Structures are given as structure tokens and as C-alpha cells.
Image (cartoon, grey):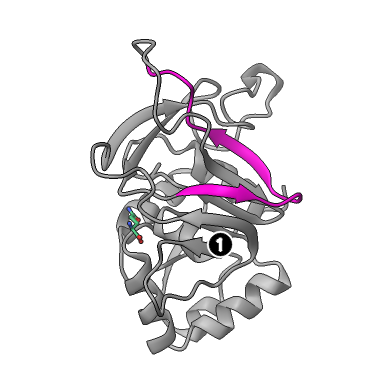
Amino acid sequence: TPTVGVLALQGDVREHLTALESVGARAATVRRPAELAAVDGLVIPGGESTTIDKLLRIFELDDLLRARIKEGLPVYGSCAGMILLADRILDGTADQQTLGGMDVVVRRNAFGRQVDSFETDLEFAGISDVDAEAGDAPTGSGRPGGPVRTAFIRAPWIEEAGRDVEVLARIPAVDTQGRPVAAAGRIVAARQGPLLATAFHPEITGDTRVHGLFVSIVAGG
Ligand code: GLN
């Protein structure tokens, strides 16, 4: 059983621990270098990317985590966590740094005021399109196939993705009533090797399949 850490400096840590355990991982909080050294994968939760950035530096985890990312540590960043995994960001604060690792440009608070926060169903490559009968669904989800239930909370989006980045989900062109969507086509989930990022929070909707996908990446998938 892989041990998956959840970076526990700020943000919604507990929901990720619960989701990880529900898909069969051993979950542990990470606040100190020794705790980081002990995990096989790491979740960087949503919260406030500027605060997590500052705390990473104060807790002296920033360079250690950069080094482990370079060595190939699987990391899943959700929302603020996605911002931290980006090589480049737009609309960050003046002194804001990221860990980097993913060849993407991420825009903070991209969805603007009117749609600050919303829930929606999204087609997610490798999850929505799996054939449950063939047994290729991410582990432990209990919900094979079909769109993923997602929550966006002052969310970023991926504005540009490099060649090695696999796009996993985009905002659809129209909403459920067939009305055009302003953010149509924006990239909101992506993977680059062992790094996974989503603009949204899956941990608060009860849909654990993104965590299942991440745990399968940690397990070598
Ligand atoms: N807007 C936040 C930031 O810039 C992210 C919000 C979230 O993680 N839910 O870090």
C-alpha cells in the first residue's frame, strides 16, 4: 500500500486524507522534512497559493520538495496546489514563487467574480471514458465511467500547456442548458508524467476517482 502525504500547511487537508483512504492509500500529513521524506506521493491541497508558498519557505520544505519533484515524486496539486506545480503563473503576487515541475502557464483566480465558485460535471480523460467491465477504472472509486463531479472555488485555469503535458479536462463549450460558457475550452486538469493537477476540488464532492487515479500513478501507473 503506498503512503500518500497531504501537505498540511494550509487548506483543506482533512478532506484529502479521507478521500485517499477511501481509495485504499495510507494517508499521512506532511509538515516537516522527515515526514516529506517518508511519503511515496504527495497531495498539495487547495487553499491560498501565496500562503502555502510562504509557509513552504518558513517550514524549509520548498527546496526539499523541488528536489523530490525533480527526482520524480508523484504530486497531485488541486487548485492552489495546481498553481504551486506550475512553472509559470499569471496574476500572482509580486513575490509569489511556485515549486514548478509542470510545463504550464497557470492564471490565478481566472474565472472572475461572477463565477467565483461553482460545481459542475466534467469529462475527464482516463476516468469518464474508462470501461468498468474491462477493469481499467481507477481503484476504489465505486463509480466507474461518466463525468466527474467537481467544485471550483476561486479557481485558476491552465492558460498554456507545453508539449509534454497531457490535457485531461477542459471546460465544455455549453452548460447543461445549452447556453455558451465564457470559459469554454479552458484546461482545468492535466498530467505531466507523475505530476497531476486539477483547477478544481474533487475532495469535497464525494467523487473520489481523481484520488483513485493519483494513487494508481503513485503505485506506478
Ligand atoms: N485563489 C486561490 C489561490 O490563488 C486558490 C483557491 C483554491 O485553492 N480554492 O491560491
Was residue 27 drawn as part of the magenta stretch in this picture? no
The single residue placed furthest to the right in the displayed view is 163
* Residue 198 image offset from top left, x and y in percent: 49, 47
In percent of the image, x 54 and y 24: which residue is there?
144
The magenta segment: 157-175
Quadrant into which the N terminus falls: bottom right
Q: Label 1, on which residue?
A: 86
Q: Is residue 45 left or right of residue 215?
A: left
Whole-percent x, y for residue 220 in the image: 72, 53
Q: Quadrant of residue 29?
A: bottom left
Secondary structure under the numbered disc 1 in the rendered image: strand
Residue 170 magenta-highlighted:
yes
Percent x, y for residue 69?
64, 71
Q: Is residue 138 visible?
A: yes
- Quarter of image, res 151: top left
Q: Is residue 212 left or right of residue 163?
A: left
At 32% across and 64% down in the image, what residue appears? 48
Horizontally, residue 218 falls left or right of residue 182, namely right
Does 84 sit left or right of 214 as displayed?
left
What x and y, as percent, mark residue 10? 31, 69
Question: How many numbered marks, from 0 up?
Answer: 1
Type of amino acid under label 1: Ala
Q: Quadrant of ligand 1?
A: bottom left
Q: Quick check: can you spot residue 44?
A: no
Q: Nearer the viewer, residue 127 or 120?
A: 120
> Height in image: 167 above or below 65?
above
Residue at the farthest top position:
178
For the residue carrying disc 1, how many other residues have a C-alpha within 10 Å: few (<14), some (14-19), or many (20+)? many
Q: Please tell me whether residue 202 is drawn above or below residue 61 in the rendered image.
A: above
